[in-house]
């Protein structure tokens, strides 16, 4: 295997607080090629912080350490902030959870997409507009000219998330981190967004890190799955082998999913064990 | 904390608990314990804030000075030594000097604390209940009652407070009571807004519905169940407003519309010191410092209370 | 699958209609508020005093004058009729005559109001120009030394009596250091050579190219406008900081960082642009606060504006002048509220559609 797109060894994210240090991520390691990796875990398991640490978007108070954090051969820990910033949006991008909050409410959708492009490429205004419209079309918005001038509050959640994807993919990144990209959307819209994301990632040959709490969704969408618990990776397995999960936490998560026809009594509850968190 | 080890903890079913643990228990056995526990947590958060503690100390000092003014003041606040002690500079005999009537400025400041406290307390006691009543009734009743009451509130909110207070005092005649009335009339609207907002939040909650189903009258619901919920945000707001009230009262005093001579009101003292500002600047300077200190105390205390009772807005 | 026309807003026609509707309801609010203002001043002027006529003409007026005024003002009519007359007169700008100056109150106010506007405008400009960047930087470097300074400026600004600070400033910078001009708007020497045109002296001096007068006016204006600017700055910087902290913690800021935008662009273009929406109201409130604070500042600086006019009238129990001044300041308050609300709608696309 040639040099991976992303190489993470022993990543840790700590938040010093008055009452002591909170360790959000504790020694996470994985490598990623141009494939789709799912990171699953409950809230607080450190999955979102892992994604943000790769982009360098953890809160300023956070301490991020790793034995290795390389993107396409570049050591992300030693490059300057400016270089890191140049990577963001251009080569690594991120789709956030809820377009209602993750789009600037007082800037039109079109201008927000153009902004990404013009930050990373020297293009004329009209050229940028043309490419933004094309990108809107690529995320299957039927009437790009009209949507271009709309403000985020004027579009539905599904449309907003399409705009978000357009904004993040317009500069042609090689790695996309999608942080719960469909959790805030209606179930019917979720599948549409996933389909758009799937085809774009496939067409452009991007790497994808898909962060979610939904094990079933991740397993159907990704090639590989990392299961995180209390800041650690407790299990890593191919999506198709999910049913053979070894770790009791993963099994617990799987058991919690209702099956049609199965007995619902008593409702299965995750029985946590202290040693998982060690 | 260790000193408290000797006091007997309240009787508990599950073995012995320190007082701290009893307060912080997540399974309080009684409403009192739950309340005390909450108060303890708030106090801890408040006490961590050093500036807020300074504010509390300033206000406590103000109250103590006002109570013990007779003991603390070295001279009479109203009768001076016109023959020998006019406009003396600060010295050992008169720490802050004397004014044009030969009165000791420090003594006047000490007695003036009573007037300041009087104004602040009276305004709070008049304005807060008016605002609370208007706000809760408006929020609970809804419909046209709400529309009318809020329209009136907005009208008062849109007014220039100080100018309106001036006009009111002009009509009522100068004096400290009328100043209090004028300030109170112009300061209740924000309280009504806050109380209404809180009421709207809980109006349709399940426990209010439960009380209603049990046959409680609207008056009882508003008085017993809604008003107590509005108290904490109201107290914070009133504390934060105290500084403004003091400054307005001092402003009225400065314009000669508040407390009348020879009362040692701080704003009026600045006004009378104004004539000698070029040569005897301390006459006007000292009362200003007193006003600044007390206002600062209320502001720090109010900020601290807000952060302790409403962690969401902490630090903003 | 690709059907994505699920936008929520109304078509243009309905949007325009809803705008008209919201403007209409806004107009109703303004009218009601203005009537409320008149009702309150009416109550203060006519109902509270034992004999309102005496309050207007003064205690020393001869009996026939008192009787004539009583008849003229319709004081023998029932209160409701009186109120109607009062509203009609107020709407036509007739607040009666001032006892002190014997002019119609409106004439007096027209003469003195520019002085107040000049001061308050300059103060607010100073406060906004310095306060907004200061508040932004304090929020960006939260907990840093600049943040502490903004905090102290705010605390002192919220706690210090403005008239006292003004007196001390006069003592230090005028009497002792002689850096600035003293009380009043202009030195007495210029009273014969300088003719006011608009009433805004700085402007008048520029129009007449009278640069020595201009410098003199500026030296008089410096201290009171800096003082007002400080209070405006204290308020605006504190609010800016709080709004900015709120905006900087929003998700769209994370998204903007993920796009690779520079910190500067994120702070000034995205966060501040969002914070600007509530800031408009803050600046308007600050302006209104300076206008009403004029009753204290102008007294200290002997500034011949509306504030000084009101306080002088107060001391002479000149009720018509006091109420006229109150109504004018109240009207300006209402106008400022209206203006800031309109600006708010213009700046925030979310309210534009409604």
Image (cartoon, rainbow, N blue to C red):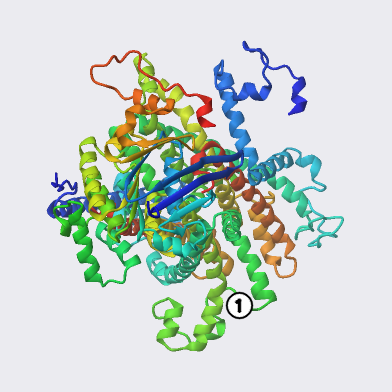
Residue at 63% x, 61% y: name it. Answer: C164
Residue B199's spot in the image, x, y percent? 40, 32
Q: Secondary structure at mark 1?
A: loop
Q: Residues within 10 Å of mark 1 (few under 14, many from 20)?
A: some
Find residue C226 and report its image quarter: bottom right
Residue B31's spot in the image, x, y percent? 54, 18
Q: Is residue B218 above or below residue C54?
A: above
Residue beneath label 1, please?
A: C180
Q: Is residue C166 above or below residue B35?
A: below
Locate the N terminus of chain C and report the quarter of the image it occupies.
top left
Q: Is residue A92 visible?
A: yes
Q: Chain of mark 1?
A: C
Q: How many numbered discs, if any?
A: 1
Residue at 39% x, 24% y: name it. Answer: A252
Residue B207's spot in the image, x, y percent? 39, 21
Determine whether, in the image, residue A246 is placed left or right of residue C144.
left
């Amino acid at each position: 295997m040639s040099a991976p797109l992303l190489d993470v060894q022993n990543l840790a994210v700590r938040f010093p607080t008055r009452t002591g240090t909170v360790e959000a991520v504790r020694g996470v390691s994985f490598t990623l090629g141009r494939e789709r990796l799912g990171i699953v875990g409950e809230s607080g398991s450190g999955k979102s912080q892992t994604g943000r640490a790769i982009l360098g978007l953890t809160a300023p108070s956070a301490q991020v350490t790793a034995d290795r954090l390389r993107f396409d051969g570049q050591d992300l820990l030693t490059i300057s902030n400016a270089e890191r910033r140049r990577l963001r949006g251009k080569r690594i991008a991120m789709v956030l959870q809820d377009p209602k909050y993750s789009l600037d409410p007082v800037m039109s959708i079109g201008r927000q997409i153009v902004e990404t492009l013009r930050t990373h490429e020297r293009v004329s205004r009209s050229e940028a507009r043309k490419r933004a419209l094309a990108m809107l079309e690529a995320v299957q918005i039927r009437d790009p000219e009209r949507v271009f001038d709309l403000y985020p509050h004027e579009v539905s959640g599904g449309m907003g998330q399409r705009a978000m994807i357009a904004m993040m993919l317009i500069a042609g990144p090689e790695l996309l981190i999608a942080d719960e990209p469909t959790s805030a959307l209606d179930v019917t819209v979720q599948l549409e967004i996933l389909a758009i994301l799937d085809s774009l990632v496939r067409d452009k040959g991007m790497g994808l890190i898909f962060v979610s709490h939904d094990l079933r969704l991740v397993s159907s969408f990704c090639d590989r799955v990392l299961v995180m618990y209390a800041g650690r990776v407790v299990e890593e397995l191919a999506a198709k082998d999910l049913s053979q999960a070894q770790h009791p936490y993963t099994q617990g998560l799987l058991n919690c999913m209702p099956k049609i026809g199965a007995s619902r009594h008593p409702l299965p509850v995750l029985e946590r064990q202290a040693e998982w968190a060690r | 904390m260790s000193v408290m080890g000797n006091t007997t903890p309240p009787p508990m079913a599950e073995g012995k608990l320190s007082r701290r643990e009893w307060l912080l228990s997540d399974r309080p056995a009684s409403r009192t314990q739950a309340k005390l526990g909450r108060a303890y947590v708030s106090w801890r958060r408040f006490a961590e804030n050093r500036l807020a503690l300074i504010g509390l100390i300033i206000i406590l000092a103000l109250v103590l000075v006002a109570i013990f003014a007779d003991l603390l003041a070295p001279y009479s606040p109203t009768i001076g030594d016109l023959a020998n002690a006019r406009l003396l500079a600060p010295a050992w005999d008169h720490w802050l000097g004397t004014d044009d009537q030969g009165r000791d400025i420090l003594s006047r400041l000490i007695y003036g604390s009573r007037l300041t406290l009087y104004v602040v307390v009276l305004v709070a006691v008049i304005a807060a209940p008016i605002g609370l009543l208007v706000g809760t009734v408006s929020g609970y009743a809804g419909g046209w009652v709400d529309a009318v009451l809020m329209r009136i509130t907005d009208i008062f909110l849109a007014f220039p407070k100080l100018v309106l207070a001036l006009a009111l005092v002009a009509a009522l005649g100068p004096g400290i009571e009328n100043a209090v009335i004028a300030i109170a009339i112009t300061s209740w609207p924000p309280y009504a807004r806050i109380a209404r907002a809180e009421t709207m939040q809980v109006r349709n909650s399940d426990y209010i519905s439960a009380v209603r189903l049990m046959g409680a009258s609207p008056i009882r619901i508003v008085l017993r169940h809604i008003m107590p919920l509005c108290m904490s945000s109201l107290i914070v707001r009133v504390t934060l407003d105290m500084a403004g009230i003091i400054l307005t009262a001092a402003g009225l005093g400065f314009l000669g519309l508040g407390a009348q001579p020879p009362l040692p009101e701080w704003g009026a003292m600045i006004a009378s010191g104004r004539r000698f500002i070029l040569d005897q600047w301390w006459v006007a300077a000292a009362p200003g410092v007193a006003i600044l200190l007390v206002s600062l105390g209320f502001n720090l205390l109010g900020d601290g209370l807000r952060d302790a009772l409403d962690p969401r807005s902490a630090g903003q | 699958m690709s059907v994505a026309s699920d936008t929520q807003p109304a078509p243009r026609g309905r949007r325009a209609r809803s705008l008209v509707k919201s403007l209409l309801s806004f107009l109703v609010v303004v009218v009601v508020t203005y009537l409320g203002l008149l009702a309150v001043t009416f109550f203060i002027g006519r109902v509270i005093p034992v004999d309102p006529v005496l309050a207007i003409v003064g205690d020393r007026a001869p009996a026939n004058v008192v009787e004539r005024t009583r008849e003229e003002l319709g004081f023998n009519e029932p209160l409701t009729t009186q109120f109607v007359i009062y509203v009609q007169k107020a709407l036509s700008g007739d607040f009666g005559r001032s006892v002190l100056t014997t002019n119609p109150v409106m004439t007096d106010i027209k003469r003195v109001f520019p002085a107040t506007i000049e001061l308050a405008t300059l103060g607010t400009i100073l406060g906004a120009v310095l306060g907004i960047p200061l508040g932004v930087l304090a929020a960006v470097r939260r907990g840093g030394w600049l943040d502490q300074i903004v905090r102290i400026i705010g605390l002192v600004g919220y706690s210090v009596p403005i008239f006292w600070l003004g007196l001390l400033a006069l003592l230090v910078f005028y009497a002792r250091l002689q850096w600035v001009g003293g009380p009043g708007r202009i030195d007495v020497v210029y009273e014969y050579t300088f003719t006011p045109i608009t009433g805004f002296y700085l402007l008048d001096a520029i129009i007449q190219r009278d640069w020595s007068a201009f410098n003199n006016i500026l030296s008089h204006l410096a201290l009171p406008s800096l003082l007002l600017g400080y209070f405006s700055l204290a308020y605006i910087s504190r609010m800016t900081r709080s709004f900015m902290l709120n905006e900087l913690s929003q998700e769209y800021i994370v998204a903007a960082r993920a796009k690779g935008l520079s910190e500067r662009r994120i702070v000034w273009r995205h966060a501040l642009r969002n914070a600007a929406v509530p800031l408009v109201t803050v600046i308007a409130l600050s302006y209104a606060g300076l206008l009403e604070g004029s009753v204290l500042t102008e007294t200290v600086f002997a500034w011949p504006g509306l504030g000084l006019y009101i306080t002088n009238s107060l001391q002479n129990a000149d009720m018509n002048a006091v109420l006229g001044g109150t109504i004018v300041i109240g009207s300006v308050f209402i106008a400022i509220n209206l203006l800031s609300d309109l600006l708010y709608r213009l700046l925030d696309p979310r309210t534009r559609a409604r």
